[in-house]
Amino acid sequence: MRFLLPIIIFLFISQNIFSQTYNYYFGNLHSHTGLSDGSKDSTSSGVTNPTGAYAYAKLSQNFNFLGVSEHNHFSATNNPGFQVQSYSVGLNQAAAANQEGTFLTLFGMEWGVSASYSGHLIIYGFNQLIGWETGNFDIYNAKTDYDGIFKKVKNNPNAFCYLAHPQFSDFSINGTASTALSNMPYNAAYDSAIVGTPLRSGLAFSTFTNYSDYPSGNYFQYYKKILSIGYHVGMGYDHDNHYTTFGRNNGGRMVIVTPTLSTANLYNAMQKMNFYGSDDWNAKVSFTSGSNIMGSQLAGTYMPTFNIVHNDGNAEIADSIKIWRGVSNSGGVYPQVISITKQNNTKTFTDAGLSPGTEYYYFVEIKQNDGDWIVTSPIWYKYSLPVGLYEKEALLDFHFYPNPVVQKLFISMAMPDTYLISIIDLTGRLIFENTYTDNSLGIDLSQFNKGIYTLKVSNSKQSVTKKLIVE
């Protein structure tokens, strides 16, 4: 789990509860160029490296970002053929091609091998190559040590990993099927590293550029399995390009839900699972509970209501909207469909059948009339029974991020009320104070000096203080 604050009695938690406008950005984070075993048509296409791939992708339709994730090891030329010195080349080419607000270009690695009980991980956020071959890595991690690689990603706050074309026997701890990720009990360290898995992947070796060459398989069952174990992961979409087809072999897209198109926002959305997988290249799906979007982890004493809106750029109607519900750490019991709507683009559902102390997860599956398939990341919710006065004592607990903060600080409280927000420096001097009547807000701290402060939140009954760091 990326993070959950302690729940006393009544605590409303969300990683995205702020009233703001979210936008939808379509792309792919799994592709290859001639730095490893991609660009197989380079003699005809002229594309041999990430620079060419990014230029090509910028001209693809309904495409806002491309991540090149080269294989992390060599073996032999084009099999997959990656060398450690190429990693900085890829990072530099991605940085040079990047256009914040217009088109994002990222560079990472596809770590691992496809041997039995192994598997591939798409990893972003490292500025050095992780590997195992003598002389061909910056950071060492044994080829079969998935425990080690998950923990390295967990310990890097800027990084995330995404399961590439996962099989039920993949990501084994000791080289057996019984210790594969999907067959083992929940592991919090791994949960902190893994953000998602694809709805579909490929076609990896497609040469089509007419947006029509879709893979026939999917990873929906795997998604349900690891959710049932307790993992907090979202649903994306991969192309795994090995030819010059970036964004064009089919119309499937990973869709990032975030306020603006920036690299920081993309990483943030991935780490918070604010994304979904879609066969349709312009379908915008809103899945919320209150003002909390997909990927949120919530808790409270109320029965949750979920709202779904399917808004397709070609005015397609949803043939069906299904809400799936499961129980985290269920012992492998898969989620079930608990509500369905036919031939409608909107749906509202309140789940009144919850047991206290249990974490539930909900995700949405949409089928369009043309057969296109969309699956969202979940919203998690843990229900607690109201307990009177002690509950009231806990209402003021608040959540704020980022910390350390550079520019804007976001604060959320459990309930709407009138709050006095104060910021005090180390000398005890009050340098900011304002009253708010909402339970979610943002404060611009860009003019604050770097240092350590006290953040104080008060209502008519209580005051709570926490340490704040401004960088």
Image: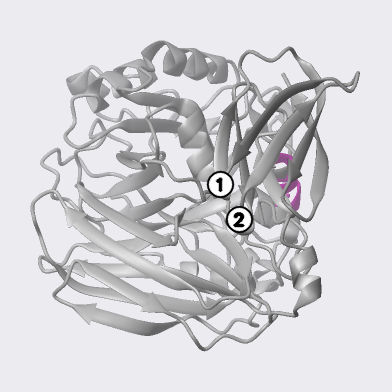
Q: Nearer the viewer, mark 2 or mark 1?
A: 1
Q: Magenta region: which residues?
A: 143-152
Q: State whether residue 112 is above or below residue 448.
A: below
- Callout 1 secondary element: loop
Q: Position of residue 23 (x, y in %)?
A: 32, 40
| Residue wearing tag 2 | 118
Q: State whether residue 37 is above or below residue 96.
A: below
Work out whether residue 429 or residue 402 is closer to the camera in this orientation and state it. Answer: 429
Q: For label 1, count other residues whose C-alpha is less than 10 Å away and answer few (under 14), some (14-19) or many (20+).
A: few
Q: Earlier in the sequence, mark 2 or mark 1?
A: 2
| Residue wearing tag 1 | 437
**Residue 417 left/right relative to 276:** right
Q: Position of residue 78 (x, y in %)?
A: 43, 31
Is 120 one of the magenta-colored residues? Answer: no
The secondary structure making up most of the magenta span is helix
The C terminus sits in image quarter: top right
Q: In the rendered structure, find residue 180 and report the number of the disc placed on it.
A: none
Q: Position of residue 261 (x, y in %)?
A: 37, 29
**Residue 21 left/right relative to 383:** left
**Residue 351 left/right relative to 128:** left
Q: State whether residue 435 is above or below residue 47.
A: below
The N terminus sits in image quarter: bottom right
Identity, as a three-letter code, of the amino acid under mark 1 = Thr
